Amino acid sequence: MGGSCAQKRPARRRQVLFPFLLPLFYPALCEPIRYSIPEELAKGSVVGNLAKDLGLSVVDVAARKLRVSAEKLLFSVDAESGDLLVKDRLDREQICKERRSCELQLEAVVENPLNIFHIIVVIEDINDHAPQFHKDEINLEISESVSPGMGTILESAKDPDISMNSLSKYQLSPNEYFSLVVKDNPDGGKYPELVLKKTLDRETQSTHHLVLTALDSGDPPRSGTAQIRIRVVDANDNHPVFSQDLYKVSLREDVPPGTFVLRVSATDQDEGNNAVITYSFLGVAETAQHVFSLDSATGNIITSQPLDFEDVERYTIDVEAKDRGSLSTQCKVIIEVLDENDNRPEIIITSLSDEILEDSLPGMVVALFKTRDRDSGENGEVTCHIGRDVPFKIYSSSNNYYKLVTDGALDREQTAEYNVTITAADKGKPSLSSSATITLHISDVNDNAPAFHQASYVVHVAENNPPGASIAQVSASDPDLGPNGHVSYSIVASDLEPRALSSYVSVSAQSGVLFAQRAFDHEQLRAFELTLQARDHGSPALSANVSLRVLVGDRNDNAPRVLYPALGPDGSALFDTVPRAAQPGYLVTKVVAVDADSGHNAWLSYHVLQASEPGLFSLGLRTGEVRTARALGDRDAARQRLLVAVRDGGQPPLSATATLLLVFADSLQEALPDLSDRPEPSDPQAELQFYLVVALALISVLFLLAVILAIALRLRRSSSPSAGACFGSVLCSKSGSEIPPNYSEGTLPYAYDLCVPGSETNPEFNFLASVEHYPATQDILIKDSSSVLLASILTPSVEDDKNSFKQSARDLVDTC
């Protein structure tokens, strides 16, 4: 049992081709690989080495998935050796019915690349059936008047085997009255005829018992027997005679049941009951017996079941005519069935690719299929086509075999699967067609880069934001599947210093959420730009970048800062001179302040908090310009003090203060004596502010109140009144640990010591520098008859407070 493209020789001899040449020449060969095996071969028997005949190595059998395909899978391929093995029972008579030649069509399919080869397995007949009569007993009636030499046709035996194994001869048991003659049918078969050798005598022997044996030519031969029982009757000396020995008719296969086929007719020269003829089928196969029916009286043959050309092309029927005297004769009826286009083409998918990559090149084979039409002639010729809206096409690879290949670019993101409908139509009139739909799934490749939902991002973040809070989120999508569509985010560039970038922002790789790592300061950094990247997890990975601009919004977190008037080198406030003849509207000076914030938060306004002479000066709300509101009067002091507040437009607003010392003089020399000698009346508003702040501090800190009261009482008891001077002996000391409440929190972190001597001859005062190692304000203690305790009250502006305190000290000295 071997195989090649050429026809196998009988007796299981096969031609040998060099295995290494077969893959080169096989595509050009016209005939399939053929094997010949006997029927009823045991399961697992080797038909032939299919891998070797196809030019495949043992390794290629598994690597290229060698397998066979057929309508009924009777064979299989050994995955280790590549042998074609018998898988199921092989009964030639069951598989091929009455056909003389029994060939099974197989397809061998290999992959990588996908291809198909045709195999024909010829099933050879063995003598596995004995001849068999339709009836085990044959009953005959023969008149005693029959002359020797008269023959009676007997029922033929049937043997489904063919050739040498089929029925070859008949034998009759020895007797003195009858002999057996074997004759040939027109279709090539043999039938027995019983011939009378000696005249019968009913009175001598009324019945005869014979044994008819049918034998085939197999090795060893098989046989079947039938008992013949002959009853001798009185004379009926004329046999019925058919009008013709052979009847032949053609019939379309689509005729309905009950259709008249033909009429057989026989005559008998006898009279009476001996001339009454009845018709019957004789030795008819089961297929024909169910398809046709015979009227025993008229001889009409009609169809009783639908005909099918694809099952049986021709029926051969023996009809017997018998008279009442038991004389009979036979004729043969041959019914040819004509083919009609009554079978639609069939589409059989033999192989289908499991995975089709979307970057597959045109021409890639994705499926193999074949067509079959049981009709004959043009009715069985089939053409195939598919729709035009799919990127595939088909072409015929061999007789009734087709390949489905790609015919254009595939894109899984646009179409993930295709339902391809294959239509097969025959050439009959009218044409019949059928269709089959296959689903082709397109596999994903990483051919799409992530795409951000916005071309760029602008994020507004207010300054002083909490560290760690999310400030924005970017989002990108990737239409690919699985890792090819999984996106992660990162920061790849920025206009910030690389080392400082991580201390400002970070991005979540999974969600794209942007987090602030620190509190932003609008005054230090108003905007910065990042380049974010979205990268998928494909191989190779694809990415996309987007720019994100962060705008740091301003908050009112900076108080105004006074640039002018500035303080002197010793920390005291400078003074400005005003001509005594200044008219109303005269520009005296201008308060200049700046605010590090922006927008409304930096929109400054100027307000007068305190003035020595209210109504003498006016202050520009937005300009900060100080102008005279009226002319200087005789009762107005030459030295004036203005406390100006500068507020921004934030919510809540922040402010700073500035102290202006204005001296009405026409020259600097004239102004200097006013600064040191001329007393200035005490400011009742300042004294009121002093006591209010002291009261607020005493209420806020109860335990310090007790300490301050104790000190005040002790100083009051130790003091003595003096009538000769404004102050007596002077005690100047720091308050030590008894420090009043801290009134400078959030505004002025400075403290001062002031010592005022009690000598009338030396009204000079000493204004000490700020004591910076004390976090709170230092007390100014002046001991006299009334033991007055003075505390420095700090305003929101550090520099202005120093100037104000100096002025107050000078006023105190002048008063003394």
Image: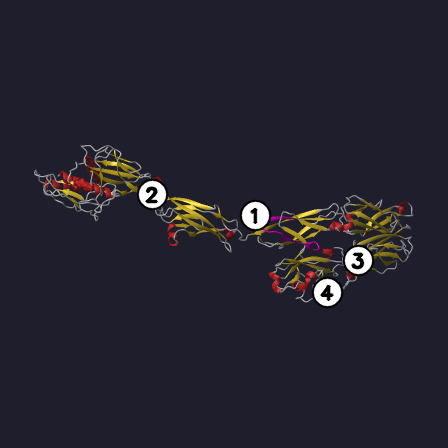
Q: CA distance from mark 3 to mark 2?
A: 126 Å
Q: In the picture provided, is 692 more to the left or to the right than 326?
A: left
Q: Are marks 4 and 2 in contact (CB under 8 Å)?
A: no
Mark 3 or 1: in front is: 1
Q: Residues within 10 Å of mark 3 (few under 14, many from 20)?
A: many
Q: Secondary structure at mark 3?
A: strand
Give the residue type that dot 4 points to: Arg
The residue that mark 3 highlights is 225
Q: Secondary structure at mark 4?
A: loop
Q: CA distance from mark 4 to mark 2?
A: 106 Å
Q: Secondary structure at mark 1?
A: loop
Q: Is residue 636 visible?
A: yes
The residue that mark 2 highlights is 597
Mark 1 or 2: in front is: 2
Which one is earlier in the sequence, the residue at label 4 or at label 3? Answer: 4
Q: Are marks 3 and 1 in contact (CB under 8 Å)?
A: no
- The image quarter containing residue 461 is top left
- The image quarter containing residue 208 is bottom right
